[in-house]
Image (cartoon, rainbow, N blue to C red):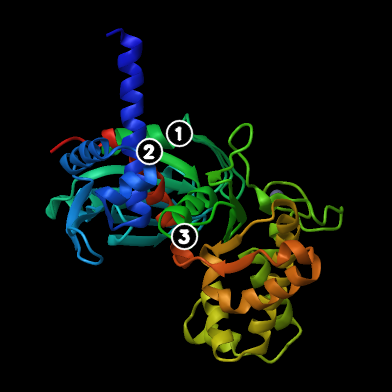
């Protein structure tokens, strides 16, 4: 046989392995007969693919389907023991590391505050130390690590594994994949935080069956991960989704954004804008329990503290969230009109205050999005809440395994 045919056959085999594995991941439990019916592959091909996926430890048999007439069929699902994954989320003011199984269930985690004014090397060393502890914890439990994913704010060159520019961290050209793979000897991928979170929603979250949706990461900045026709939309250079830097109020009098421009949308809707709104209210001596909370906890003004005040019925806290929600809604209405998504999923640190943000987001979207388009869209909170991008870091490794099952060795 000539080498081209052999290469073609290997390609077809890998495509079919991936097709079947993705179906089991998305719709399990499924029987071999169901897989043959859905994929159109013949039963012997499906059986041989399943044999290989079982040998690689990715799939296992789980009970049988006794319903209906005919012989009971053995059902298949993803093997939760397939291996473990390390996820790293570089927030701007924190670092989170988690170890999960292949279904994204958390087995170990740690979150540490980070100081964004620290230099780059210090924050990376802090992160590497947590990763080292995660690997040591995994070793004690005999975890087999399949890879390490990193989610970071900013524009990322996924192919080169380099963070190109993160305005909120003031970092340029950081070769994350090289740094983390040399340190861990694992396969490492890096992805923009909102893109990673969008992939997580598609694999394990609220967008498993959605083809067109927008994930909105709300925290220090506002980032977007856009799925169009079932695929993450990356744009020409892979940098698409910087929705927070839409110059919606680009006038000389407006706030300066971390990116250096004025009037970017995120400066009206990010976590700092909420803190500023609260500060402005306290300066004019509005009655609020916030100063007492800060004193009692000897803590600075933060989103969790403002949320705590809102939970206690504090008007100034509730109104500050509501104003930021309106600002979020304005930007989202424009995106809804442009992309006609089925879902907008809000996650990231600010989603802890989702119950206070969502009503005003929806109110403003109702006012500004075209009714026919707005009817189609559902605005929801991410089931992963503030961990959306941490689970995203896991998801980029899982997604690679689902695309290339042969990267996982036979047992
Ligand atoms: Zn900006």
**Near-viewer residue (49 or 135):** 49
Residue beneath the point at 41% across and 45% down: 396
Does the closest atom of ligand 1 sit within 8 Å of the Cβ of label 1? no
Q: Are marks 3 and 1 in contact (CB under 8 Å)?
A: no
- Crowd tier of the residue under label 2, counting other residues whose Cα lies within 10 Å: few below 14, some 14–19, many 20 or above: some
Q: Which mark is residue 280?
A: none
Q: Which residue is mark 2?
A: 403
Q: Considering only vertical position in the picture, is 331 above or below 87? A: below
Q: Is residue 4 left or right of residue 343?
A: left
Disc 1 is placed on an element classified as loop
Disc 2 is placed on an element classified as helix
Q: Which residue is mark 1?
A: 161
Q: Quadrant of residue 43?
A: top left
Q: Which mark is residue 388?
A: 3
Task: Tell me the distance, in whole angstroms, between the alpha carbons under discs 3 and 1.
Answer: 21 Å
**Near-viewer residue (409 or 247):** 409
| Percent position of residue 256, x then y | 75, 54
| Percent position of residue 10, x then y | 31, 23
Task: Tell me the distance, in whole angstroms, between the alpha carbons under discs 2 and 3.
Answer: 22 Å
Farthest residue, direction front: 69
Q: Is residue 365 left or right of residue 111?
A: right
Between circles 2 and 3, the one closer to the viewer is 2
Task: Tell me the distance, in whole angstroms, between the alpha carbons under discs 1 and 2.
Answer: 18 Å
Q: Quadrant of residue 251?
A: bottom right
Residue beneath the point at 32% across and 31% down: 14
Farthest residue, direction top: 2
């Amino acid at each position: 046989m000539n080498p081209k045919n052999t290469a073609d056959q290997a390609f077809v085999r890998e495509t079919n392995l991936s097709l079947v594995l993705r179906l089991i991941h998305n719709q399990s439990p499924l029987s071999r007969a169901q897989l043959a019916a859905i994929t159109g592959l013949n039963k012997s091909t499906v059986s041989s693919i399943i044999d290989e996926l079982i040998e690689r430890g990715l799939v296992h048999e789980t009970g049988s389907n006794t319903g209906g007439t005919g012989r009971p069929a053995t059902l298949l699902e993803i093997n939760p023991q397939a291996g473990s994954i390390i996820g790293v989320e570089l927030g701007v003011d924190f670092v989170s590391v988690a170890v999960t199984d292949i279904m994204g269930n958390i087995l170990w985690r740690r979150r540490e505050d980070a100081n964004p004014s620290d230099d780059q090397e210090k924050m990376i060393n802090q992160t590497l130390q947590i990763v080292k502890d995660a690997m040591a914890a995994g070793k004690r439990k005999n975890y087999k690590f399949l890879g390490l994913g990193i989610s970071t704010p900013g524009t990322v060159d996924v192919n080169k594994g380099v963070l190109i520019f993160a305005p909120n961290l003031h970092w340029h050209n950081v070769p994350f994949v090289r740094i983390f793979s040399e340190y861990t000897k694992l396969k490492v991928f890096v992805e923009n935080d909102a893109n990673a979170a969008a992939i997580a929603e598609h694999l394990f979250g609220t967008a498993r069956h959605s083809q067109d949706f927008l994930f909105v990461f709300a925290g220090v900045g506002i980032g977007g991960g856009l799925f169009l026709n079932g695929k993450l939309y990356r744009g020409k250079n892979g940098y698409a989704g910087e929705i927070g830097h839409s110059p919606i109020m680009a006038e000389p009098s407006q706030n300066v954004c971390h990116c250096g421009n004025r009037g970017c949308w995120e400066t009206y809707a990010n976590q700092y804008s909420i803190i500023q709104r609260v500060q402005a209210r306290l300066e004019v001596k509005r009655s609020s329990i916030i100063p007492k909370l800060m004193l009692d906890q000897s803590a600075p003004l933060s989103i969790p503290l403002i949320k705590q005040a809102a939970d206690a019925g504090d008007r100034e806290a509730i109104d500050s969230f509501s104003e930021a929600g309106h600002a979020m809604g304005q930007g989202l209405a424009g995106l809804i009109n442009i992309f006609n998504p089925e879902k907008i999923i809000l996650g990231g640190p600010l989603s802890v205050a989702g119950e206070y943000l969502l009503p005003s987001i929806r109110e403003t979207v109702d006012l500004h999005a075209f009714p026919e388009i707005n009817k189609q869209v559902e605005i929801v909170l991410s089931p992963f809440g503030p961990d959306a991008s941490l689970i995203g870091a896991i998801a980029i490794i899982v997604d690679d395994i689902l695309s290339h099952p042969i990267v996982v060795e036979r047992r």
